[in-house]
Image: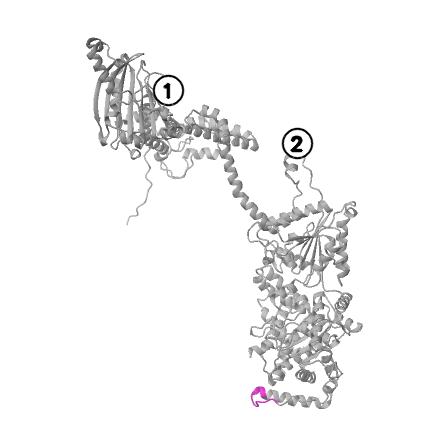
Amino acid sequence: MDHADRTHADGTVDGLDPGMRGVDAAGPDVPESPGGSTASTASTGTAQPAKTAPGDGKPRRRPLPLWDRVKFLIMLGAVFGFVVAADVSGDPLMTWADAFRIQARKSAWVLVLVGLEVLHQLHMLIAERWSAYHVFWTERVFGRAERRMLRLNDWNRYRLSRAAKWIVGLALALFIYARLSHTSVFDALVQVPGALWDAIPFVLQIVLLMVLVVGQFVVMFWFLSKGGVDTYFPEDITTRFADVWGQDHVVSRVQENVFYLERPEEIESRGGHVPGGILLWGPPGTGKTLIAEAVAGETGKPFVFVDPGAFSAMFMGVGILKVKSLFRKLRKLSLRYGGVIVFFDEADTLGSRGALGSGFGGMGNGARSWFARQGAPVAAASGTASGLAGSGPAGRRADPFGARGDGGSGDLCNGLSYLSSAARSEITREQAREQFVMGGGGGGFDGTLQALLTEMSGLKKPRGFLNRVVRRTLGMRPKPPPKYRILVMMATNMPQSLDEALLRPGRIDRQYKVGYPSKEGRIRTFEGYLARVRHELTPEQIDRLAIMSPESTGATIKDTVNEALVQAVKDGREVITWLDMLRARVIKEYGLADDHEHIDRERHSIALHEACHAVVAYRMQRGRVIDLATIERRGGVGGFVAHVAVEDRMFMWKSEIEIQVMVSLASLAGERMFFEGDNTVGVGGDLRSATLLVANFISSAAMGETLSSRLSMLEQQMGNASIDADRPFGEQVEVKLRELYERTEAVLGVNRREILALTHALETHKTITGEDVEAIMEGRTGPTVDGRRYHEPDFLGVAERYHSDAVRAHRGQVHELRKLPELGRVAASSPAEAPGPSSAAGPPSPTARPPAADQGQGARRQAR
Amino acid sequence: MATRRRTTCPRRKSLPGTLLLLTVAATMLLAGGCGSPSYDYVTNKKDGAFLRVPNGWNHQEMPGPALFGIDARNVSPEMLQGLMSREWVVGLDAAQRFDDSRLLIPDATLPKGFAQVRHLLPAEANAVSTNDLRNFVLSVDDAVAAQEKAVRQDPYGARLTPDFLLLADEVVHKKDGVHGVHLVYQVQTDAGLVTIDQTSLLDNGQTVLYQLILACSSLCYAQHADQIGDVAKSFTIEPTDRGQ
């Protein structure tokens, strides 16, 4: 039924004849009865004949426009005319009449089609004018056939349709073949087998050509899919678990997995299953690869090492082939040796499927959220990327060169080192929100990761052509696949880059954090590396080194020992001394100081700036001590105060956050206090840290006057429903900052002597240890500085006079700052022990942890 | 200002037009189905040779060369291949069933023969002359000479039962420089008297030979002379580039 929507002959502009609307409304299966139609006609009057009445309610076919009615006739007529004309043209003897007659026979099919179309149009014409005829065909004939067809189920209908299509297609092909071979269809049918037989060589040629073309690609991709995978056997590797120092808990866990791999019956007989995957994650250099090597050396199974770049391929699809090839190899090795271990180093190269980009800090997005739930240092890892001196692996190394050496506005003056790890996490999380919009590592988007996921725990399908096809053909069930015991090990320092699906149970069942080694491990590591060189360190000193370096790894310890050796050789010695170790530690922890001398005025202001931080930190902080204070320039950093945490705590209190903010604000408060309300731009970084801390904790941890978690509201896109209609959020932050600023001022005010004392010590020695700071504050003797002198009655006067000169010089009243006053007794330590200005670092507090750097003043210098 | 309302003019019913077209179509069908052509057309558009034979005559393209005028003993397989690509032969037979075993049968009771187009080999093209066209089936000039000699020896006997009688001998000139001869002659054979109607033509460049040969017994010829004459007359040549 043609439902074309167009204006039709009786003037109605919708797509249906008025009569047809009734039919459609009633549905095709409920035709209007002829009796009803008659009654309807009678009731509507007899002014118009029933066949032309548009509104008589009888169902009729909608009249076709003339063009629709004749277009096929015209087309077929044109085709016939063409073949007749083709006969006449070029043949001087042929007459039109004869050509017509000849083509009427040769191209009779056209005339047959014309005849069918004529019949069709006659049928349509009658149906348009005779309702009963129309109803008969639509309901009795076609409707019945349709209903009968609908009785078949869908599958049978599909099969019938498919068979019909095949038959029609083959018949058409046969017809064409018959015409081409100038025979009848039946003769052609008989000839088909012979023709097919004759065509075999040609078909084989085509097949060969295709095989050659496809074969080129197969061979090319086969070659490309090789490489990047090495197999080792136990005798190839000499590393043992005993060589992994300080990671006993991880090693024992890994040993457990290897045990089950080697003796699967221990767990399988009890209804369990062998864990299939281990992820070792943690900061760089903590021994993840070493553990894997030890596994390779200890286990009796083959160990397959996958190169990190193995899945990076030029062509799309090669990665997938490599994964498939790898797992084919693993299955083979597993069957042959009863198990196999595969190790993916730097597994973050496998990438993710975009979870990282969309969900940092959000809920349920990627491995990042998993690690967030597990308490992994997500922000710490991101701090690495952001260049901030964050906590954990990033914060350990206060990279004075990487932070803000670009002459910025001093964002990182003093960095974040005086903040606790939680406070730093908050701030770096803000950074990460901005910076981790894109990312996710390489790969993962070309199907490699998906292929890996499928191979790791895909469909447990029967394998092999014989198994699947031949056995099924013979009516046998295919054999299920054997148990492939494959232990997948992965190592990464960016677990958040991994796809969440990779880490689900069944793939990577177990995630072990390979953190910093334990103290015993560090001692053992120090001893191990020191045993390779000549040294005169006592066990107590080694113990102290281990205490000082809680976040040291095997790699950093090795590096530190090596640096100590370099220092010794530089001094013409072959034996490493305690002093060499201290120098090496400073160089490795904080980098080499530049050979730069501050001008006097600047030296004083920088020293004062750092002294204010140090005094407030010393007076207020709990659980953290100062490790080092320096005004020596390192790269773009003019000076810093480094702190270490005495204890590793999980939560911070509001009061502690406030102290962190006060430590940040100390530089501003101190500069204004000592320089008559003036301050440098170097406080910018401190203010940034303070503001972020206050804002974050007000918005998430009720640090201010409100309880609502503004952070959650923002995360849930409810920023407009925020609570600051009558109390602007910025105002709250400002109020809090100002309150803390006043408290900081109060602390500084009562510690004026200590500030000036520390300033003097820093100006004198450039670098002092935490114990020196403590000695100055308490009036004791420190490792390099005698703090008692600073508590003598005349010191304050001397210091104030010197500071007054500095202020006058700052005002421009004098051009030359007077010489830094000598205090008579400089240092308690002997000259031999006193480290030079560039390497001053005495043994810090025994409870000290390595500091997170406080990169101070550098940006301020640059801003000037 | 009066608002002009656009109204949709109801279209006229298309019944008359539809019926007219359907009638035309039906007529076409009837005309096509009922009539049969007056003639059968033998056509070689590639070489420009056309022929019209009475409806009912059989004609069939022959798979191999007719080898008229060529000594078959000297034809190598390569040459045969070349000839096949250079020669087009259609057998003609007025009998109900086409006998493709021989194209010329002396005692045929119904006209039989063939039409051929042959692209001459360069040597042939250089050697051929209009006079040679006369002697492609048999050497007409020799036969005429022999008949004259026989008349001289036995004037009555030879005239009453001639071995060879040339009924028509005309030179043909058609358009585009096509030229040749049209001969009708009667020959005494073992099977009796045979009449042959031979049209041999060359194109202007004398590179393509067009021939129409029809033969049957003399009695047959007497009965079908008009048909044979019509066929010979319809033999039309329109040389194409292929022949050059």
Q: How far from the left and from the top, in percent, is residue A295? A: 74, 55
- Identify the magenta region: A809-817
Query: From what the image shows, is residue A126 above or below residue A668?
Result: above
Quote the CA–CA distance across marks 1 and 2.
59 Å
Which quadrant of the rendered structure holds the N terminus of chain A?
A: top left
Name the amino acid, label 2: Gly
Dot 2 falls on a residue whose secondary structure is: loop
Image quarter of residue B36: top left
The residue where tag 1 is placed is B100
Asked whether residue A268 is drawn in magenta, I would say no
In the visual, does A177 lie left or right of A442? left
Q: Position of residue A425 (x, y in %)?
A: 65, 66
Q: Left or right of A109: which side holds B184?
A: left
* Element at label 1: loop
**Residue A826 in the image, given as x and y percentages of width and height:** 72, 86
- In the image, is residue A818 above or below residue A124? below
In this view, the residue in front, A61 or B202, is: B202
Any part of residue B29 in sight: no
Q: Residues within 10 Å of mark 1 (few under 14, many from 20)?
A: some
- Point out which mark residue B224 bears: none
The chain containing the residue under callout 2 comes to A
Image quadrant assignment for residue A529: bottom right
Which subunit holds the residue at mark 1?
Answer: B
Residue A272 place in picture, x, y as percent: 76, 47
Residue beneath disc 2: A475
- Residues flagged by tags 1 and 2 on a common chain: no
Check residue A816 for magenta coloring.
yes
